[in-house]
Image (tube, helix red, strand yellow):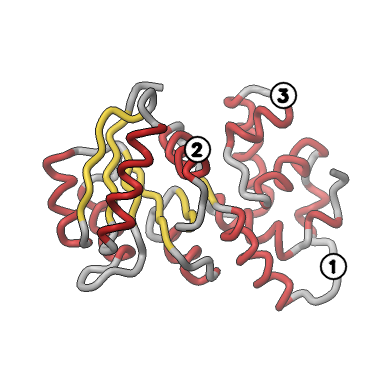
């Protein structure tokens, strides 16, 4: 992977500049340059000139919030990847972020290594959810399914490999992580996931993850 340019967007200046320092310190072989701004409005303008490969952006900011800025960036620069970096793991925010075009959602209390891993995975084309974000979706599923759910019809359409991959997707794993876990190629993983989407009638990774969690797939597939 070539070294990438990263834009950090957060109205908490101490957090934003601290994260910049951390990523400069540990991401030297993966990150070529980092820029920081402190509002959604500024971010939309900065992307025009800085041309980052990836944006790490808070959701809640005064004025133009992170989700509004995300939608503006996706419209103007669809090639730029955006990861939401926030304090909140509520499933509503996760859903909105992904629906608006974010390729990841991680929490501000993530370790520096986790943030860097997220940057690397997102740049490789992965969709990255923090453990807390996945747990938020699982919590929603438990509220609607307090007991083991009925086995959905789509489950019987999946091969054993597809079931295993869907289980790993439900845990928030990226394509690269799934490939490493199952000792298969990344292209093979992408092919399996495409087939899974078709069988689940899921339009994207988020919907496949939601359906898997609500079906309590961890009770249906052997680890």
SS state under label 3: loop
Alpha-carbon span between mark 1 and mark 2: 36 Å
SS state under label 1: loop
Alpha-carbon span between mark 3 and mark 1: 31 Å
Alpha-carbon span between mark 2 and mark 3: 19 Å
Residue 112 versus residue 131: which sits nearer the camera?
A: 112
Q: Residues within 10 Å of mark 2 (few under 14, many from 20)?
A: some
> Which residue is at 71% across, 57% downward?
212
Seen in the picture, residue 174 relative to 184 is either above or below; the reply is below
**What label does residue 117 carry, if any?**
2
Q: Within the image, what quadrant is residue 71 found in?
A: bottom left
> In the rendered image, which residue does mark 3 sit on?
183
Residue 15 versus residue 57: which sits nearer the camera?
A: 15
> Which residue is at 47% across, 43% downward?
112
Q: Is residue 155 left or right of residue 211?
A: right
> Which residue is at 47% across, 55% downward?
105
SS state under label 2: helix
> In the rendered image, which residue does mark 1 sit on?
150
Q: Residues within 10 Å of mark 1 (few under 14, many from 20)?
A: few
Q: Residues within 10 Å of mark 3 (few under 14, many from 20)?
A: few
Residue 5 versus residue 220: which sits nearer the camera?
A: 5
């Amino acid at each position: 992977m070539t070294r990438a340019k990263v834009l950090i967007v957060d109205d908490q200046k101490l957090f934003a500049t601290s994260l910049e320092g951390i990523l400069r310190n540990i991401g030297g072989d993966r990150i070529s340059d980092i820029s920081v701004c402190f509002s959604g409005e500024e971010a939309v303008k900065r992307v025009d000139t800085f041309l980052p490969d990836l944006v790490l952006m808070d959701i809640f900011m005064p004025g133009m919030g992170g989700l509004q800025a995300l939608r503006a960036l996706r419209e103007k620069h669809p090639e730029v990847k955006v990861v939401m970096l926030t304090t909140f793991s509520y499933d509503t925010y996760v859903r909105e972020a992904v629906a608006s075009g974010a390729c990841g959602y991680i929490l501000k209390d993530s370790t520096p290594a986790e943030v860097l891993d997220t940057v690397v995975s997102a740049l490789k084309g992965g969709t990255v959810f923090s453990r807390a974000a996945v747990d938020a979706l699982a919590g929603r599923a438990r509220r609607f399914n307090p007991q083991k759910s009925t086995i959905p019809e789509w489950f019987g359409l999946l091969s054993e490999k597809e079931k295993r991959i869907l289980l790993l997707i439900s845990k928030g794993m990226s394509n690269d992580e799934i490939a490493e876990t199952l000792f298969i190629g990344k292209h093979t993983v992408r092919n399996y996931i495409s087939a899974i989407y078709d069988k689940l009638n899921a339009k994207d990774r988020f919907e496949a993850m939601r359906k898997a969690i609500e079906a309590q797939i961890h009770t249906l597939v052997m680890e």
